[in-house]
Image (cartoon, coloured by chain):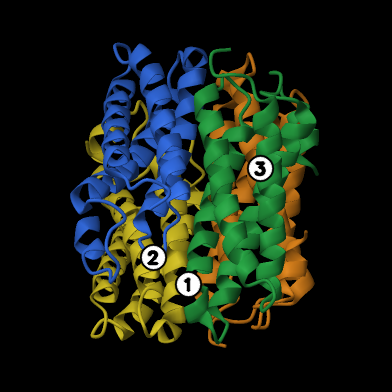
Chain colours: A orange, B green, C yellow, D blue
Amino acid sequence: MSVEEILKTHRRPPVAELAVLVRCIDECSTCEASCTVCADACLAEDDVRDLVRCIRLCLDCADACDDTLRILSRQTDPDLSTQRTALEACLAACRACAEECERHAHHHEHCRLSAEECRRCERACEDLLAVFPAAGQ
Amino acid sequence: MSVEEILKTHRRPPVAELAVLVRCIDECSTCEASCTVCADACLAEDDVRDLVRCIRLCLDCADACDDTLRILSRQTDPDLSTQRTALEACLAACRACAEECERHAHHHEHCRLSAEECRRCERACEDLLAVFPAAGQ
Amino acid sequence: MSVEEILKTHRRPPVAELAVLVRCIDECSTCEASCTVCADACLAEDDVRDLVRCIRLCLDCADACDDTLRILSRQTDPDLSTQRTALEACLAACRACAEECERHAHHHEHCRLSAEECRRCERACEDLLAVFPAAGQ
Amino acid sequence: MSVEEILKTHRRPPVAELAVLVRCIDECSTCEASCTVCADACLAEDDVRDLVRCIRLCLDCADACDDTLRILSRQTDPDLSTQRTALEACLAACRACAEECERHAHHHEHCRLSAEECRRCERACEDLLAVFPAAGQ
């Protein structure tokens, strides 16, 4: 089942263009999982001491993604400031995590994959912010 | 990107057969999102008073799914009792939520879809429990 | 045990003045619980249809508080932009939730208590933002 | 504000004896924070390679505690099997984490404190399970 399928059955209109909203929720969901795996895969590496910042930012990113996918999944009586700032926080967490994972991408395949997913989620957040209604609306 | 792709890059072997583990993580992820949407879509219905138990169990199920997908995503030095009891708790939450959503499935399409997803996640938890190593191993 | 006690044993200096940081983590923790209870207590009220926005914003606020308490609890190699935007998102969620809970405070004691806790958490976020290092540091 | 104060305003009776329920929610909340700090404090230690299992189990324990505090905070139309299995999963996560943290308690003060908190949370889960209504009730 897809998030799009169930969101279409909601009585309230989506808080933003459905396709853009759905892509952001889906990327947050995938990014939470891939950052959780990357943090744990880093713990199992011999050079874990060089991966401390990567682990830490992966944990932050997983938490931010989970928070944001939940807040964005709700369409009933939203507060636009709550939703917009959650998106901005998720974007910042994805960007910081991607930058650090990229530094280890040539050593560790999980860092390369995690960096790619963080960049996809970062873009999905940017795209949603670009079509998001202003807080006064 | 898929969870399977990044799990395959982990230095440690998966805690259980990869395909069964991955399906359970994926269903937990989908079920967290669909239960979050269903709880919120119920809030927007005119008969919200009849949906109170459905909302409550959807919230429980989303929380249990998120906990379980995180614990199962970690392959490094697992504690089998922690993982097995998380799976059992997720299975119980999915089953209770599915039973309640099914009672509203003929009225509300989101309840029908959420019930179906809860049943898929319940089966994925059962299948993983069936191949899970015993706690003493 | 207090969060302050364990944070003091961390090898790295706190990301901001310890007392202000600890108060924010503690308020996020309390606010997550009180918003979770208030959302659920609203579901049990006869006038649940009038409380739909309150429930929704309590769920958002609980999610934002949990995300923020985790990100702020980590002192190792922080990314200041990730931490600052999480704080801003938590502040926005607390403010929106407090405003809505205050509208129901004269009917429902749980809304009055939840509103008060959201305001305390909002202030704790503001106070921490005021002493937080700039992202360039 | 205390969780007890807001739970007392709920229209529904608590799912179990209030004082025992409240202590369990409070310990889950404290244990989530202390395990999050301990995992991060371990990352900052020179002997992080010896602390990999401790970090991993602290992350599991924080996730289980958060799930359980949310599920236990809800008193409206509970499913006893969902609540009981969440409690059992939290107990298992606390016990496994405590055992591992205790192994490092003489080196690292954060492990000693985290172990103590995990044991308190384990006992609070046991005490609540002891007074919890049977699933058939």
Could you classify mark 2 by the number of other residues whose Cα lies within 10 Å: few (under 14), some (14-19), or many (20 or more)?
many
Identify residue for label 1: B52
The CA span between labels 1 and 3 is 30 Å
Identify residue for label 3: A33
Q: Position of residue B53 (x, y in %)?
A: 48, 67
The answer to whether the residue labelled 1 contacts the one labelled 2, judged by CB atoms less than 8 Å apart, is yes
- The amino acid type found where label 1 is placed reads Val
- Element at badge 1? helix
As drawn, is C74 to the left or to the right of B67?
Answer: left
Quarter of the picture containing the C terminus of chain A is bottom right
Classify residue C105 by image quadrant.
bottom left
- Element at badge 2? loop
Identify residue for label 2: D76
Note whether residue B111 is visible.
yes
Give the camera-side residue of D108 and B26: B26
Q: Position of residue D8 (x, y in %)?
A: 21, 64
